[in-house]
Amino acid sequence: MFDTILIANRGEIACRVMQTAQAMGVRCVAVHSDADAGAKHVEMADAAVHIGGSAPAESYLKGDRIIAAALETGAQAIHPGYGFLSENPDFVEAVEAAGLVFIGPSAKAIRAMGLKDAAKALMVEAGVPVVPGYHGSDQDDDLLAREAEKIGYPVLIKAVAGGGGKGMRQVDDAKGFKAALESARSEARSAFGNADVLVEKFVAKPRHLEVQIFGDGTSALHLFERDCSLQRRHQKVIEEAPAPGMTEEMRAAMGAAAVRAAEAIGYAGAGTVEFIVDASDGLRPDGFFFMEMNTRLQVEHPVTEAITGVDLVEWQLRVAAGESLPMRQEDLAIDGHAFEARLYAEDVPKGFLPATGTLTHLTFTERTRADSGVRAGDTISPFYDPMIAKVIVHGPTRDVALARLRAALAGARVAGTVTNLAFLGALAGHTGFAMGDVDTGLIARDIDALTEVPALQPWHEALAGMAALGLLDPSEDAGFALWRPLRRQVMLARSGEDSLLKVRVMSPDRQVWSVGEAEVTAERRAGAWYLDGNRAPEVSVAGQVVTVFDGYGMAFDVIDPLARAAGRSGDGNVIEAPMPGMVRLVDAKVGQKVAAGDRLAVLEAMKMEHSLLAERDGVVAEVLAAAGDQVEAGAALVRLEAEDEAAA
């Protein structure tokens, strides 16, 4: 076994790898960027090396610096985690040329699965079923359009070097093909430096099932399947293992196909073979098709660990150190059911816009496994994926595990940034999901119901007001006057709406609040506050933000009316950057007439592209940024004016 390894990654996965490696007595070296100097994975490590600037291209994608750090610190091996350089065959070769061990598959295996078109051709040779489609090297527009006609609409255009839904477009008919092709190529070129695409048949009721495999370079086995069908824009949201409705016949067929795929390329280490499944007539052994192979540890690997009792990171280290596979296929069995929900800093009402912020509160219930790379006090950086944690639960049955997931999400306490916690809670409570009736279109079909803002009651606002004014623990002589109740007021804002709250403090243990037309009585009994009979939940106060931990967390801004009036300027016609990022594209031109909803610019931030749209009809008066500009949150990009103003 290795004495020292370096983890060439950050955040949650770096912490996850260290947890197992250090438990095995292996010394761990972290690498970090400027932004991550005080990060959790740096604190956990036995040693840490600074490798560059905050942007990934200046640090975590600098393979030469990572290898130098490993050599300097005496590491014998490098664990890539996932993302960044984990599936870069050139990096693997450089690691091995430096006399180090890459904890993962060979460069040859990665290359074999790196391009979707070549990988599918290889799978056909290995006897693994693939979706009907065009995977050729000829990228002529007219040829691709003709191939789409042959396949039959609807079709999917997919970047051959892609992943995570980038460079992917669904096309329902021939008239939309050209625009979708241009869009997919543009995104693929930006994300992967390769604009080539393939065209496949779109499966009508698709489920996304994947099989965890593990190989030693000669033979391989599988650790059963995961269902990753709950997706939004091709990004996984909640995963589970095993797949609901799975038959033993289909499990055996899929597992065997995945093992054939791994052995066809001499795979070593942990990997995942992803299948698209036609669930229109249930799960059938002839209804699954190879999509791609991820030649690394997957984000959702904990659900497999939960149902098999296997520590996949330990297996990675042992096989990379030269040991044989720790178990045989017949030794593996499924125990119970597990779920994983991905908790992100993102603004769901604004279209799941990635968010930043400093976490002022972050706790989970006792039964929850929460894999996280951040702590309370840490800042969600604009430079990286905004994941806060993976919330993982296990139970003896799917129903029990799902009930535990609901409880874990309801019991999570997160403050300091907006999150998708309420969205995850709505998904966990979705009737169809509870029945196991899932497919990749479920979220899109029910998006309105799933993104409803949790109901706000007057007592929630009153509780936030109590916290804002410091009245949750008033002293005997500060909260009221003996001859009359003390009257105070506070202005709160939530979801863009202001509320002026008024309170009469009757005694240290009794307050009467006016919230709009409602009146809320707060009374303290046996040390606990009750508002209109509701026991007050936990509250977090951080600066000018109060979070009430009910309904997955309700955040209120405490407003200073004078400061707001002094700072109010402009006419609301300026399109601003919602977060720090790079201006990828500017569509707006001075003098151009635009309608509400027209795209004015594209901002690239947090590994995603965000279209900035006109909020009303008007004329472009000024263009204040150019493609390639790095901008801060709130930076003015485009200014509009009314058409009559422009004419004047």
Image: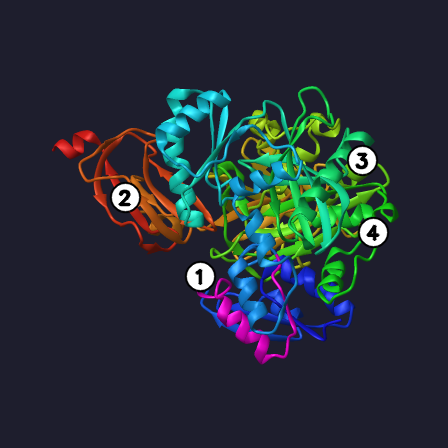
* Residue holding disc 1: 57
* Residue holding disc 3: 398
Give, as a single range, the part of the protein colored magenta: 55-81
Mark 1 or 3: the one toward you:
1
* Disc 2: CA contacts within 10 A as few (<14), some (14-19) or many (>=20): many
Q: Position of residue 367 (x, y in %)?
A: 80, 50
| Amino acid type at mark 2 | Val
Residue 76 painted magenta = yes
Element under label 2?
Answer: strand
* Disc 4: CA contacts within 10 A as few (<14), some (14-19) or many (>=20): some
* Residue holding disc 4: 309
Q: Most extreme residue toward the front, as rendered?
A: 125
Indicate whether 8 appears above or below 487. Answer: below
Mark 2 or 3: the one toward you:
3
Q: Earlier in the sequence, mark 4 or mark 2?
A: 4
Q: CA distance from mark 2 to mark 1?
A: 28 Å
Say left or right for 129 vs 355: right
Element under label 3?
Answer: helix
Q: Position of residue 358 (x, y in %)?
A: 54, 58
* Residue holding disc 2: 638
Indicate whether 488 appears above or below 17. Answer: above
The residue at 80%/53% (across/down) is: 310
The residue at 54%/48% (across/down) is: 114
| Amino acid type at mark 4 | Gly
